[in-house]
Amino acid sequence: MRKAIFKKFLQILFLALALNTFIAYVVTSSVLLKRNREDMRFALESVNQMFDYSGNIEEQFKKLSEAARESKSRYTLISRDGAVLADTSVDEADTMENHLEREEVSGALRGGYGYASRRSGTLGAEMIYAAICSDDGQYILRLSVVSSGMREYTMMLVPAVLLSFGIAFLFSSLEAERFSQSITKPLQEISREMSKMDGDYTNFHFEKCPYEEINVIADTTMRMSQNTKDYLERLEKEKQIRQEFFSNASHELKTPITSIRGYVELLESGMALNEDTAKDFLARIKKEAMRMTNLVDDILMISRLESRGAKADIVDIRIKELLDESIASVSAQAAGRGIAIHREDQDFAVRADMRQMTELFNNLLSNAVKYNNEGGDVWVSVRKKGRDMLLTVRDNGVGIPEESLERIFERFYRVDKGRSRKQGGTGLGLSIVKHIVNFYRGTVKVESEVGKGTVFTVSLPVADPDVRV
């Protein structure tokens, strides 16, 4: 790339210098030609002022011939009708042809001054002609000098042009080398840094360069590297979560299956000697089967919510009725431990799936009762804020340690495993809450202090303003 930039830069530079040289040559030639015309006019005016047209013309021209030979020029006196009266280079001027149609003579007759360049048939050379009218307008005084055309100026200009061209090209080449290196150096640095990656997405570091476009490439590369690193870390974390999920799910399913198998074997062995014992064994088998069914249902619900494949049956739900049912579902457990449930609600409707809303309310209320102290309190509040439903469940129970707050929504995560199993929890309740909230694109916040209690606040954009109470 560096060679390509350098080569292209030199090509453009060469064309620019060549064009500039040509323009300078043309302009300089024009200036020199203009100066030559002015010098010839000045010489003619000087001779015209000294010339006595009423005196002996031949004698004056003889004297003028000496000066003309020294300056390698030629003077010609022409009458108004075009006849040549005298010439410093020809002895018998009357033998010369009529000059009335000559360009410089015609110009002098029209405007007092004429100029032309052509090849002279008399001298057989390229000539430059200038002519002026005498003061009385009866004569035309013409001056001609030998000219080599543009070659004359070329010989004068070429050395200077070549020297300036060479110096400019040299310094420009050095600048082109520096410029191409300044572009490719940061690109090479980016390439070297990226070659270090090799599966290890460490943070790159690039020095700032003078070109913002290359800085953008470096910044984009660093962001891509960081995004890739974050993505891989997220994949690894999700992999670990899946492994933990399968491990926990297997364990949670294996426990009731083992219990069921044990009771079935006891029944088969005839150890249930009386009907009461047999009924007790069957009741335990039924309890473990229900536990396993609930666990499978919770796992399936999380899976559908996570993949957004859940079929939501959106209906109008009266919040007051929903809260009544949720409180009733935990009232027996709360009453058994002397826990009082306090409610504060507004009577409004939401548009959501009934089963999902029931799971949301029940899981939060059930947790507030399970992880409370004997004789504790639970406060539940549901109100409408714009198009959002705000659900708050607060308790004055055992609380959640700060280090566990970030993990309580993970599947099968339990802060107090012994207490959870004793209360019959699966460790999926809060995970279901989180997935339902995400399904409706809402938010859930938790605040807790060990020994003082926990507050869950859920905001869902499901409140229906069109349904009137």
Image: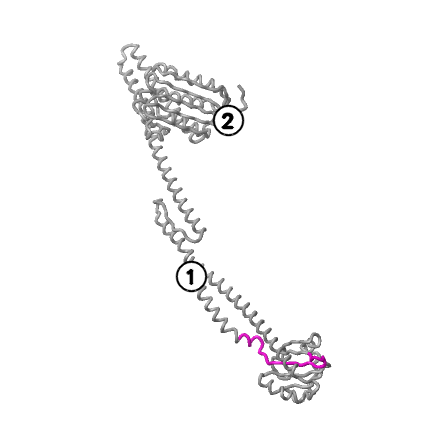
Q: What residue appears at the point 29 percent right and 17 percent down from the top-left corner?
A: 263
Part of the protein shown in magenta: 133-154
Disc marking residue 177? 1
* Type of amino acid at the residue the image marks with label 1: Glu
x%, y% of residue 202? Answer: 35, 45
Give the labeled residue for mark 2.
386
- Circle 1 Cα neighbour tier, 10 Å, few/some/many (<14 / 14–19 / ≥20): some
Query: What is the C-alpha distance between the residues marked 1 and 2?
Result: 66 Å
* Type of amino acid at the residue the image marks with label 2: Gly
* Residue 454 falls left or right of residue 461: left
Q: Is residue 97 above or below residue 405?
A: below
The nearer-to-camera label among 1 and 2 is 2
x%, y% of residue 276? Answer: 30, 10
* Residue 264 falls left or right of residue 14: left
Membership of 148 in magenta stretch:
yes
x%, y% of residue 293? Answer: 37, 22
Name the foreground residue: 20 vs 70.
70
* Residue 163 falls left or right of residue 122: left
Q: Quadrant of residue 130?
A: bottom right
- Circle 2 Cα neighbour tier, 10 Å, few/some/many (<14 / 14–19 / ≥20): few
x%, y% of residue 180? Answer: 43, 58
Identify the element where label 2 is drawn.
loop
Q: What residue appears at the point 58 percent right and 83 percent down from the top-left corner?
A: 71
